[in-house]
Image (cartoon, rainbow, N blue to C red):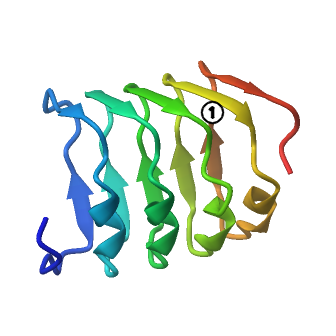
Amino acid sequence: CDGTYTGTRVDLSSRGLSGTIPPQLGDISQLEYLILIDNSISGTIPPQTSKLSRLEALSLNSNSISGTIPSDTGKLSLLQYLYLNSNSISGTIPPDTGKLSQLVRLDLYDNDISGTVP
């Protein structure tokens, strides 16, 4: 993506994608839905995703994503749906996640996450 994308939805579910999520994705300021379900995406969730201030749904489930949930996920104040299940994510749920007042659904199962939900 060259930063000129003006849409609000990216849905690339079940497309056989591999590789990592590019940090430049955080530059798509109008993005409301990022759906990358059921691919072979690896690596970590880039911290730049916290720049997606209009994001309402982040669906990265059923991939091979590792690492931890970015600590500044709580900045996504409009986020309603966070699907990270069926990956290899570890660690704890960041405390700032408790600031997601619009959150309707949080799916984190089938990972190695410990602790409590803030």
**Relative to 59, is 75 on the left or the right?**
right
Q: Residue at x 28, y 52 (%)?
A: 22
Question: Which residue type does callout 1 highlight?
Answer: Leu
**Above or below, 101 relative to 38:** below
Q: Is residue 28 above or below residue 63?
A: below
What is the x, y in percent for residue 61? 43, 33
In which quadrant of the rendered image does the N terminus lie? bottom left
| 118 left or right, relative to 86 | right
Find residue 29 and report its image quarter: bottom left
**Numbered marks: total:** 1
Q: Quadrant of residue 64?
A: top left
- Relative vertical location of residue 27 with respect to residue 88 in this rendering, above or below: below
| Of residues 74 and 10, the one drawn nearer to the viewer in this rendering | 74
Please determine whether, in this image, residue 103 is positioned above or below residue 93.
below
Depth check, front residue: 47 or 14: 47
**Residue 27: where, in percent of width, then height?**
31, 75
Q: Identify the residue at horizontal 17%, vertical 32% (top origin).
A: 17
The residue depicted at 63 percent of the width and 25 percent of the height is 109
Using a 10 Å C-alpha cutoff, classify the residue at mark 1 as few (fewer than 14 neighbours), some (14 to 19) or many (20 or more). Answer: some
The x and y percentages for residue 13 are 23, 38
Is residue 103 found left or right of 17 in the rendered image?
A: right
Q: Position of residue 41 (x, y in %)?
A: 30, 31
- Residue pictured at 37% horizontal, 26% vertical: 63
Dot 1: element: loop
Residue under circle 1? 108
Q: Nearer the viewer, residue 39 or 26?
A: 26
